[in-house]
Image (cartoon, grey):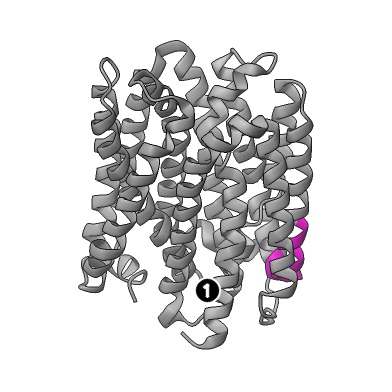
Amino acid sequence: MTPAERRSSAALAGVYALRMLGLFIVLPVFALQARHYPGGDDPALVGLAMGIYGLTQALLQVPLGMASDRLGRKPVILAGLALFVLGSVVAAWAPTMAWLVAGRALQGAGAVSAAVTALLADLTRDAVRTKAMALVGISIALMFALSLVAAPLLVSWVGLSGLFAVTAGLSLTAMAVVAWVVPPEPVHAPGAPRARLAEVLRNTELLRVDLGVFVLHAAQIMTWLSVPALLVQAGLPTAQHWQVYLPAVLASLLIVGGLLFRLERKGLFRAVYLGAIALIGLVQLGFIGQLHAPSLAVLGVLLCLYFVGFNTQEAGQPSLVSRLAPAQQRGTALGIYNTLMSLGIFAGGAVGGVVARVWGPVGIFALSTALVVLWLIAAWPMKPMALDSARR
């Protein structure tokens, strides 16, 4: 990478990381802490509060991605981060679950993922874009690890409302990075938004990746509707959950960085890509086997394997989308991609909450397994050249 590319990658990975930390930091404790709010004893309402963020994200990812193609990436990113700050403030103040749902919805309205990844693609060459996108993916994984460690500790000091106040501060910091650290964006000649959108929607290879990110994040939210309770059932108090999460995440990062990326460089990206999907599905089945007599050691291994699959996909999918889409369509393509990601978050929370109320954890993990199997079937015929594009 050139110095400008390194600066762009580090700065935008930092922006993404700060925003995702603001999202992730409430995830490990939300289902447990929501019980302290009026209405927090209803799993369906708790699931809605977790997932509504994804619904508003889904509604705005494509419009804001297309706006970034026409109006510029930075103005759209700054406006979206401001909405995220507003939503965090409302959620921090919320006295009831209804207001908490409203705050989460406002947070989701700051749908800047497409604009951020499109700007990163604009500021890097094809030859180094996978590295740049992998840096974003690694930053997301690290923030997930940090949130799993920090959330149980912080929530015992400041409560759930305090965590939302932290998210507001993180987003304000991200706005400063965008304004003063990220290099100026290149100027592209505007095109016809409807034509670009139609063309992107006809690209079957992109649609396969879009389905994948939907399932990846739906399964993530559903998993964290049940895993914290499993750890408590295994005898580990909430404040000590980091003792399982941290080793699992760090070990997964070593595996992803030390083994899987090497396999990709050897031309085995397809095997890695499909193997990561299968691994996530097998972990869901493993969680079902732990429902009656959970073991902390087994849960730790399952979580490590889950993070291997999740982090591999999180690093590879945005790069794949950015390479499959032409430069002037990246905002639109990544908008659709992030829309499906957001819909996955919403479906994982809303549908997962209903499933938890009716069938309990076994229903959640069974549904996650079925979705992952569907994803694997859809991904299997992907053209080798499409998969190879993420490796170059």
Residue 144: percent from left, percent from top: 48, 48
Q: Secondary structure at mark 1?
A: loop
Q: Which one is nearer the viewer's eye here, 187 or 3? A: 3
Indicate whether 24 appears above or below 119.
above
Residue positioned 70% across, 14% down in the render: 38
Residue positioned 70% across, 80% down in the render: 184
Q: Is residue 248 left or right of residue 357?
A: left
What residue is shown with label 1? 326
- How packed mark 1 is, by other alpha carbons closer than 10 Å (few <14, some 14-19, many 20 or more), is few
Residue positioned 34% across, 77% down in the render: 392
Query: Which corner quadrant of the image does residue 301 belong to?
Result: top left
Residue 140: percent from left, percent from top: 49, 55
Amino acid type, label 1: Pro
Does the magenta run of residues contain 73?
yes
Residue positioned 60% across, 74% down in the render: 328
Q: What range of the chain is rendered magenta?
A: 68-79
Q: Is residue 269 visible?
A: no
Q: Main secondary structure of the magenta part?
A: helix
Query: Which corner quadrant of the image does residue 343 belong to?
Result: top right
Q: Is residue 49 left or right of residue 278?
A: right
